[in-house]
Image (spheres, rainbow, N blue to C red):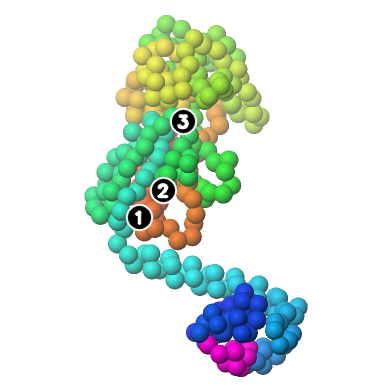
Amino acid sequence: MPDEINDLRLFAQMVDAGSLSAAARRTDGSTAAMSRRLAALEKRLGVRLVTRTSRRFDLTVEGALFHERALAILLAVDDAEAEISAQARVPQGLLCIGAPSEIGRKRIAPLIEAFSDRYPEVEVRLVLSDIGLDVIDDNLDVALRIGLPADTGVIAKKLLSSRRIVCAAPEYLMRHGTPQTLTDLSTHDCLRLVRGQRVFDRWLFVEDGRHREIQVRGTLSTASGEVLHDWALKGRGLALKALWDIEDDLRAGRLVECLAPYHCDEIELYAVFANRRHLSPRVRVFLDFVQEALGETGLGQTSPSAR
């Protein structure tokens, strides 16, 4: 097998150089040796790969196909070697992680503490923001974000999903009553999230197998998920929150689930990074660690009231 791989690499170098003599100069070999290697390869394959002249050569149809396949094989071999080599190295150096503020503070920060204990040679920097962080523009190794990124030039790895629920503090429900149907939302003060100029004032539900969008109103809105959460705890209105943000409050009775028969749309957490190829050991082990840790917690995937 090593000889076959070397033949593929040599043939790719010949095509890239454009002639046997140019390829010989690049590899510190002789043109005659190149010619013999090419002839032996053609004999083994039983086809002519190139049409040769004194100064250059052109690929035959079979040669073009062989070149295309050779490049793919060489890329796979190089990737495999790089991956194994990376795994053999001890993770170390600076690792920059970005995350949304609320889930970052409550869930990701404790995981990073455990990650740091396991990999003490890695220096971890956690950046929290309610404005979507960009893995490239913000110089991050990994950006944890809600929903798929619009940029198709990055890799997104789904970590987990969570249902969203309508909730409120017991004090609010005592004063204003508990909504029983989706139309009841129009009579309630609803806390709304803002992103830039967009106000998220349409909540999506599933009723009798159909999607139904309900426009909500309220006196308070914010760009901060944590502020919205705090307002809900203080009885300022109904909130639409991911279960992973509020399950502790539901268990403790600080918040109460409303409209349980109606299913809301799910929310998904992704790990976004720039390139799958040649990931550094510290990025690779972090991705594996956080996916394993979140999977073990079952975070946000089951309603506490259903346990």
Disc 2 target residue: 141
Kindly indicate the quadrant of the structure image that contains residue 50. Answer: bottom right
Instruction: Name the residue: 51% across, 22% down.
Output: 194
Q: Is residue 165 left or right of residue 250?
A: right
**Direction top: furthest residue:** 175
Q: Earlier in the sequence, mark 3 or mark 1?
A: 3
Q: Is residue 210 left or right of residue 126?
A: right
Name the amino acid type tagged 1.
Arg
Instruction: Name the residue: 37% across, 48% down.
Output: 290
Residue in the foreground of this view, choosing between 221 and 15: 15
Name the amino acid type tagged 3.
Ile
Residue in the foreground of this view, choosing between 159 and 100: 100
Badge 2 element: loop
Name the amino acid type tagged 2.
Asp
**In x, y percent, where is residue 216?**
57, 15
Badge 3 element: loop
The dot on residue 282 is 1
Pointers 3 and 1 in contact (CB under 8 A)? Answer: no
**In x, y percent, where is residue 295?**
40, 47
Mark 1 Cα within 10 Å, few/some/many (few <14, many 20+)? many
Mark 3 Cα within 10 Å, few/some/many (few <14, many 20+)? some
Pointers 1 and 2 in contact (CB under 8 A)? Answer: yes
Instruction: Name the residue: 46% across, 9% down.
Output: 177
**Magenta region, residue range:** 29-38
Q: Earlier in the sequence, mark 1 or mark 2?
A: 2
Pointers 3 and 2 in contact (CB under 8 A)? Answer: no
Residue 31 included in the magenta stretch of the image: yes
